[in-house]
Image (spheres, rainbow, N blue to C red):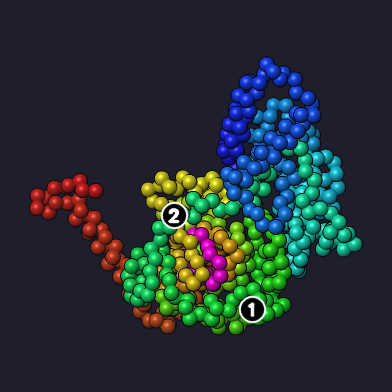
Amino acid sequence: MLSCRSLLSQTKNKKRKKSRSKNKNKNSNTRVSKKHNLVSKKQNYEEEEEDCEERFNLKTSAAPSHTHGVQPLGNLYINPGSVNSRNTGLGNLQTLTDELVLDILGLLGGTHLGVLATVSKSFYVFTNHEPLWRNLVLENLNAGFLYNGSWKSTYVAACYLSFDVSSVGVSGLRVRDFYSDYLFQSWLCANLEMKPEWLQRDNIIRRKGISVEDFVLNFEEPNKPVLLEGCLDNWVALQNWDRDYLLQLCGDVQFAVGPVDMKLQEYFRYADQVREERPLYLFDPKFAEKVPKLGSEYEVPVYFREDLFGVLGNERPDYRWIIMGPAGSGSSFHIDPNSTSAWNAVIRGSKKWILFPPDVVPPGVHPSPDGAEVACPVSIIEWFMNFYGATKNWEKKPIECICKAGEVIFVPNGWWHLVINLEESIAITQNYVSRRNLLNVLDFLKRPNANTLVSGTRDRVNLHDKFKNAIETSFPGTIDQLVQKAEEKKAQQKQSFWDSVTDSKVGAFKFSF
């Protein structure tokens, strides 16, 4: 949950200042008119909004903001005369948490939500919670939709053709004295700009013009991230891929956007208007099959051209994606599928990356013991608000960088990573298997629960055997050589450890570790 301590402290400090000023004039001005009290309350609320904007640097885009007057719960405690209209409007349901109320409302259809919105101001706020309407659109309009300024307007316009949604104000009513951390948090995360201090740390290794041998020796074999510059200079995509070009090239082709398919024109319309906590991300693994010219206008950088999954031909798991998204879109913490490594090339825009090594689980992330599921209950922005600051004091700090157009980041297998677009961005990413991580991939594919872990293919159960047999056919003896090399390396590491704790001259232990 969002911590409102900073908002609360700001308002408390402001109240102390006003109290001191009031005490000075207490003898000369002991009576305040009711009208003046109302004006003061309005001014206080406006000043609180200004404080929030100054501290959090809210977005200034033309997209609408659906706050409905919701304030953080801490504001109620410094306004003792106020009554939380959230509770009075819910009646006996006020004992339920906001999350549970929204879970119950999520079982309703659009018509019932509309009727319930007329019951009270509290139900009006809850039933206009945008994620409720977003789910209705994505579940019921998967054949396509035109985003219409808000998810509710989009749903109404698509399902009730005779209703003129343009006659209804997008921002809706403003409810007084409604306090909820959960709903305010959702609004704040949808409207918050990335803080400068979240973008300052840049500790990734950067290289330009290194040889393949240097890349393998210093980064791929030790499994370390690196940002590579100058790899895309010859890409046609780097020169051509802007909105106009892609719209003309792709026409009516539909691309995967979350659980739905959309034309680029529809998606760009959505991206231009939306302001939400988790914007939809265009992430399509079949883009090169749908529009072959897209696949021909980029080439795999020389460092990643050994891709052993290629021996499976058309049976290989999904491995390449075109990625598009507005500022604020991205991917929360995850590990790439099937124990593969990956590279990500930015063609337009810029991306903030945070990476943790395989043995460090990021704060706020809760993987299941078998690795089949990863729970990251907070959005990307909320993760920065609540968890990012703590990582500054960690012994194993995350690797961070901003990857700009024309740059490529190497993501080693097993590394946790989060990515957020700092502006509208277009990128290409590919997952691959080289000799350096072949054994890891084979081990992953033969796990007992591989049918739940393997992704990007229909045949999850037999993928290990198919892949191993294809490797042995195409590259005889390779697996045995890699196993032998791994065993030798393990033996050397074990010997090196005992050398560090045993003094061969005196035959005794020395504590040097």
Q: Could you tell whether 190 is left or right of 239 in the image? A: right
The numbered disc on residue 245 is 1
Residue at the right extreme?
Answer: 162
Extreme-top residue of the structure: 27
- Kindly give the residue lying farthest to the front in the view shown: 28
The spot of residue 157 in percent (x, y) is 83, 61
Is residue 344 inside the magenta stretch? yes
Q: Secondary structure at mark 2?
A: loop
Magenta run includes residue 321: no
Seen in the picture, residue 84 relative to 226 is either above or below; the reply is: above
Q: Residue at x 45, y 72 (%)?
A: 433
**Residue under the point 21% across and 48% down:** 512
Mark 2 is on which residue type? Answer: Arg
Q: Is tag 2's residue or tag 1's residue first in the polypeptide sequence?
A: 2
Q: Residue at x 56, y 60 (%)?
A: 422
According to the picture, the residue beneath numbered tag 2 turns out to be 201
Magenta segment range? 338-353
